[in-house]
Amino acid sequence: MKDYNLKNLFRHAANVVTFAPGQIVFKEGDPATIMYVIEEGQVEIMVHGRLVETASEGSIVGETALIDHQPRSATVIAKTEAKLVPVDQKQFSFMVQETPYFAIHVMHIMADRLRKTHD
């Protein structure tokens, strides 16, 4: 499962958004309608002001809000220039239904982040 890279699924995406180093992607508590696949660069995931993870290409951020429909549980800030592919609820649901490894990969990332948050 570690070899599964979401970047490959979204390599032809036309809706890439670029964030400059230090730019906020989203803030804890914000309403949420999309998640992002990291195509290039690194982002920092902060929970209550504490760094939980530095995520890089092939990973995702913002997935929890698409699953529980609650406000953002973390703040994400671009550490380097970061190119992110936005994924909305409709596309997320399609990917979960049609691409089993996508769903398993999302669960793996969420479980890993939950463990890091509680450490």
Image: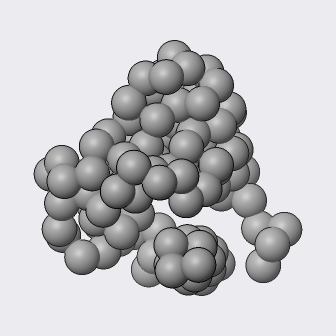
Does residue 71 appear to the left or right of 25 in the view shown? left
Q: From this view, report whether residue 116 is shown above or below residue 7.
A: below
Residue 94 relative to residue 89: left or right:
right
Residue 5, by quadrant, is bottom right
Quarter that holds the C terminus:
bottom right
**Where does the image place residue 73, in percent across and percent down from the top left?**
30, 62
- Taking 54 as reference, is 63 above or below it? below
The residue located at (68%, 45%) in the rendering is 56
Counting labels gives: 0
Q: Nearer the viewer, residue 81 or 36?
A: 81
Name the residue: 26% across, 57% down: 72
Q: Residue at x 55, y 43 (%)?
A: 44
Question: Visible in this render: residue 46?
Answer: yes
Residue drawn 64% across and 25% down?
Answer: 80
Which residue is at the front of the view, 8 or 110? Answer: 110
Instruction: Where is residue 115? Give x, y as percent.
Output: 57, 81
Quadrant hosting residue 86: top left
Q: Give the color scheme: rainbow, by chain, secondary structure or one colour.
A: one colour
